[in-house]
Amino acid sequence: MFDFIRGQFSHQFNSFRRRWCRERSFPFTDVLSAERVQSVLAEEGITFRDTMFTPLVTLWTFLGQVFSPDHSCRDAVARLIAFLVGQGKRPCSADTGAYCTARQRLPEQLVARLVRDSGDALHASVRTDSLRIAGRPVYVVDGTTVSMPDTTANQKEYPQADTQEPDLGFPIARLVALFSLVSGAVLDMALGPYQGKETGETSLFRQLIGRLQPNSVLLGDRYFCNYWTIGMLINADVNSVFRLHQRRPADFRRGRFVGPEDRMVMWKRPSRPDWMTVKEYEDMPDELGIRLVRVRVRQRGFRVRELVVATTLLDPLEAPADELALLYRARWQAELNLRSLKTTLDMDVLRCKTPSMVRKEIWMHLLVYNLVRDLMAQAAQRVGRQPHEVSFKGALQTLNRFQDLLAVIPKDRWPTLFDELLRAVGTHRVGHRPDRYEPRAVKRRPQPIALLTVPRDVARKRLLHAA
């Protein structure tokens, strides 16, 4: 994959890509070819000096850093040196200073554009009716938090939780991600502080509504089930399927009968909240038609025995109650996607020490995630499976082992290499365990290490002056 990173290699890469693409798609080339990255740079009006670490070199070295289990800058530069030596080129310095400076120069909007482009392309390329409803594509939204190093700059922009004492906590950022249900790709992301005005998941999600295609469906948990979110989605010609919020009563003795435990009710528009402008309020519908479907969970061992799904898909012939129940169950894919990002790709605890680099680090994780998802989609198509049936961790492990071979094997063997790569990724199937249940507890005990209860400088002084 590192054959993309330098302009002097582009002729070799493009000639191989033309040869490869006669029969099939070469992983990542549509989104992250040298031409594509340079095109985005030109569209964004970004210029750069002719140094070793151009945006292309920096981008691919940064990608390799996120791909690798060792996320250090030293390992990333060592990989670049190994590649250059393997290609018979002059290696760069092993010192990480130039690379770290180049990462700071790398435009955030470049990586964000590549994430959105890769997500859109993957969402459009995967065709299946198994994760659609009423013939509409389905998006899924969910939020999470990430922490970062405790620096003054990070604390200023992404403060730690109020429950933690000063100098004892870590800065926290909240992000809301919009996924394609069928492919698992990240289509966009909104980021903000963990707490404060307009920092909740619904507030961040409002920044993403424009990314939804008309005549589609949004799937989400109960947190998004409120009048204003549903009203904005209706104005964008987007239907919604949410779990009913716990503060909303569900009286199935009222409303229009649609079917057994299936009612249509009307929600009246509340008074205008402080964050909404008068124009936005006037654009909201006076009332919303909401269909409530009660779902009874009969699997033994499940914590939830009953839930109510609220949707704006009002036609029971177009969206039967049992299909709505199955669709809401698929919402769990968003949790699995976030687990792949935070656990498998180690995005849970970030490493950069400034807010701008933190944002770039998050976008880079999302880009790596989409590239792995693209590889999984190709491998799934090859073996006749759905993309969500292929293991994300298995795909990442296989790709990490295969990518190093590109620098050392002859180029005429690359097609065989990628055939084997796709075959190997396709064999790592996620176990089909729809009714599995486990206690929400861990067996392994943590090590008995004392917690830091005072600032680190104070703790050092205590050690220094201990008798």
Image (spheres, helix red, strand yellow):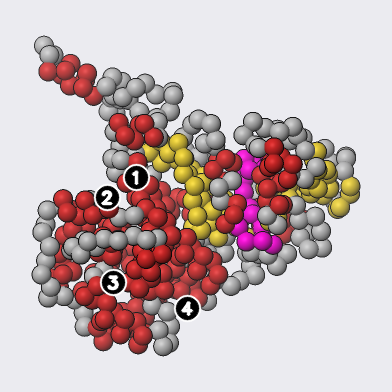
Name the residue nearer the viewer: 326 or 443: 326
* Picture residue at 12% right of the left edge, 62% below the top: 92
| 64 over 402 or under it: above or below | above
Residue contact at pointers 2 and 3, CB within 8 angstroms: no
Residue 219 included in the magenta stretch of the image? yes
Q: Which residue bears the numbered disc 4?
A: 382
Residue 104, numbered label:
2
Q: Is residue 224 left or right of residue 429?
A: right
Q: Are marks 4 and 3 in contact (CB under 8 Å)?
A: no
Q: Relative to 464, does residue 103 appear above or below in the rendering?
A: below
- Name the image quarter holding the C terminus: top left
Residue 368 position in % (x across, y down): 38, 60
State how far apart marks 4 and 2 are (Cα).
39 Å
Queried whether the magenta region covers residue 317, the answer comes back as no
Q: Name the residue carrying label 3.
A: 4
- Tell me which label, 1 or 3, sits earlier in the chain: 3
Q: CA distance from mark 2 to mark 3?
A: 21 Å
Q: Which residues are magenta?
A: 212-227
- 10 Å neighbourhood of mark 3: few (<14), some, or many (≥20)? many
| Mark in the foreground, 4 or 1 | 1
Nearest the eye: 67 or 62: 62
| Crowd rating for badge 1 (residues with CA inside 10 Å; few <14, some 14–19, many 20+) | some
Structural distance between the alpha carbons of marks 2 and 1? 8 Å
Q: Mark yes or no: residue 367 visible.
A: no
Say what amino acid the circle numbered 2 marks: Gln
